């Protein structure tokens, strides 16, 4: 089995005349958390859409688990799961029904059991039979991620998983992502928050104006900068730390 | 590919179950779709009916087919709406990134349209029966009526699919149906076309609603359908084929 589960070579994509990806190369190792970091409009979502077979590239090759995303989309789809930028949950159905639906669409046996297990794991048992429309942002995201786990995909794509979430919910998602990786799932996430990449990712690639301008582990990226100067600074707690301390959620991270 | 083909019907079944839940959980779909035609029926029968119905016998019977078509035209607007919400909300992206058969998500909406329109029509028929709608037609004629209505629903649903996929806003997704709802007015649905001025009459007599209304009316009153049935079927099939082609093209572009 090749060590790289995702291989991307020379990926190009333009919308009409607007070039979004101008030759993107990177690879993701099996079982790692890989963060694609970039500002708005850098091409992160376009990259994820190509890798999850929603969009065809104009040029270049991308493979997942050895399957070409344009030539063997069904094999790729069987190996992946996508959690898009906006929670792709059905608001009118209940949490349980959402999970059962995905399990049925993945043609799995005993969809109800799968749903029950995930509801427990994601702390949604109490809300299971409520319509998703009544869920908070964090609950929706958790349900969304739970839906992505059905069928045990090898790779999970998370497109800006914590955008729009409050700090508490963000910590919950981070915890879940780490849990996924601990279970051997490869996680590919995009983010525009440096802190998120720093917290979660084994390796980081920085996408800027349609190209990968740097990639590596955090330590490797740090070496790109001049060695740290020693300065003595009084450490002030950030507002986030204060907020989390007050509401007593500090231990979650 | 073989495996996904085998799952087509089960996938469509899951999709159908999903959107039928939507319909039963927000009954407003059925209510709005049935309310306007029922109001029209009451208005035409008890307000205008005395004047309009002169010489047509039972006016409820006369207007029944036109009311059905009107209900279907407003019912399919909800298909656009539901599809639009799915496409915008990201649910479709999830489906498309899963190993399910290609157009199962779309067919789910199409079957939902057929089922929900059938429910709306049944509600309207119940009200019409209370208002004095009667037909002596036998099983075979009723089956033919049901078949034509289903075909009409199917062809308009595929038009609605195009609107749902191409619309830029929720309002836009439903707006295309308005002209369709008014088509029965410029047809033989409520008054005989020979009472209309020449130009209007030419349009009225050559648009699909007239042929369909005349066919259904003949079937219900056990009169010979003549060539109307073939014109009606040709219109429905023609719209179906063209709309299906463009809907699939729009879908592939969305999904590609």
Image (spheres, coloured by chain):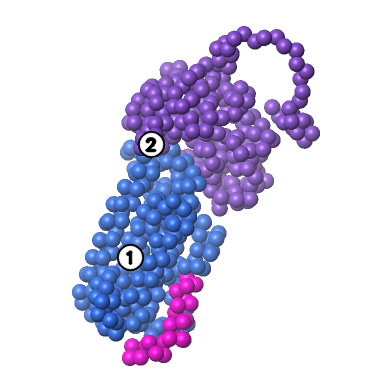
Chain colours: A purple, B blue
Residue at image location 38% in from the left, 44% down from the top: B254
Please state, as top left, top right, bottom left or bottom right, where the N terminus of chain A lies in the image. Answer: top left
**Is residue B52 highlighted in magenta?**
yes
Q: Are marks 2 and 1 in contact (CB under 8 Å)?
A: no
Q: Position of residue A166 (x, y in %)?
A: 67, 38
What residue does disc 1 label? Answer: B152
Residue B176 coordinates in the image, percent (x, y): 39, 61
Which residue is depicted at the point 32% across and 38% down? B2
Q: CA distance from mark 2 to mark 1?
A: 38 Å
**Residue projecting furthest to the right:** A246
User: As rendered, which of A104 and A227 lies closer to the eye?
Assistant: A227
Q: Is the residue marked by circle 2 packed among few (<14), some (14-19), or many (20+) residues within 10 Å?
A: few
* Disc 1 crowd, CA 10 A, few/some/many (<14, 14-19, 20+): many
| Residue B61 left/right relative to A226 | left
Percent position of residue A163, x then y = 59, 36
The vertical placement of B55 against A28, above or below, is: below
Look at the numbered disc 1 and give the secondary structure of its residue.
helix
| Residue that mark 2 sits on | A15
What range of the chain is rendered magenta?
B34-56
């Amino acid at each position: 089995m090749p060590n790289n589960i995702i291989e991307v070579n020379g990926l190009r994509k333009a919308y009409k005349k607007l070039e979004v990806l101008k030759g993107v190369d990177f690879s993701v190792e099996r079982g790692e958390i890989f963060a694609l970091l970039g500002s708005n409009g850098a091409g992160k979502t376009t990259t994820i859409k190509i890798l999850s077979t929603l969009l065809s590239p104009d040029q270049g090759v991308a493979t997942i688990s050895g399957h070409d995303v344009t030539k063997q989309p069904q094999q790729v789809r069987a190996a992946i799961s996508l959690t898009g930028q906006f929670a792709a949950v059905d608001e009118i159905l209940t949490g349980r029904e959402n999970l059962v639906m995905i399990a049925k669409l993945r043609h799995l046996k005993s969809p109800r059991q799968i749903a029950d297990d995930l509801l427990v794991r994601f702390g949604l048992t109490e809300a299971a039979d409520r319509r998703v429309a009544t869920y908070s942002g964090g609950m929706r995201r958790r349900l969304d991620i739970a839906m992505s786990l059905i069928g045990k995909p090898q790779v999970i794509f998370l497109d800006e998983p914590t955008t729009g979430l409050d700090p508490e919910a963000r910590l919950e998602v981070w915890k879940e992502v780490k849990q996924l990786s601990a279970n051997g799932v490869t996680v590919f996430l995009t983010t525009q928050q440096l802190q998120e990449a720093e917290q979660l990712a084994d390796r980081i690639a920085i996408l800027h104006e349609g190209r990968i301008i740097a990639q590596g582990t955090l330590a490797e990226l740090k070496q790109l900068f001049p060695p740290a100067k020693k300065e003595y600074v009084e450490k002030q707690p950030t507002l986030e730390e204060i907020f989390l301390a007050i509401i007593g959620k500090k231990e979650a991270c | 590919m073989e495996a996904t083909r085998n799952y087509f019907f089960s996938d469509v079944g899951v999709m159908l179950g999903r959107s039928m839940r939507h319909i039963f959980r927000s009954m407003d779909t059925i209510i709005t779709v049935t309310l306007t035609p029922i109001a029209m029926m009451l208005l035409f029968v008890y307000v205008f009916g005395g004047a309009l119905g002169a010489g047509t016998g039972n006016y409820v019977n006369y207007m029944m087919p036109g009311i059905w078509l009107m209900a279907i035209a407003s019912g399919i607007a909800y298909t656009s709406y539901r599809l639009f919400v799915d496409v915008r909300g990201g649910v479709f992206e999830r489906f498309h990134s899963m190993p399910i058969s290609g157009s199962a998500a779309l067919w789910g909406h199409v079957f939902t349209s057929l089922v929900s329109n059938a429910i709306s029509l049944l509600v309207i028929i119940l009200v019409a029966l209370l208002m004095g709608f009667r037909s002596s037609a036998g099983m075979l004629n009723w089956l033919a009526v049901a078949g034509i209505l289903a075909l009409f629903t199917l062809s308009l649903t595929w038009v609605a699919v195009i609107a749902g996929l191409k619309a830029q806003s929720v309002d836009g997704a439903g707006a295309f149906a308005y002209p369709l709802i008014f088509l029965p007015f410029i047809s033989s649905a409520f008054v005989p076309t020979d009472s209309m001025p020449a130009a209007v009459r030419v349009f009225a007599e050559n648009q699909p609603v007239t042929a369909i209304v005349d066919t259904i009316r003949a079937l219900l009153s056990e009169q010979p359908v003549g060539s109307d049935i073939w014109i009606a079927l040709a219109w429905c099939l023609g719209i179906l084929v063209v709309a299906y082609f463009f809907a699939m093209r729009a879908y592939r572009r969305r999904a590609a």
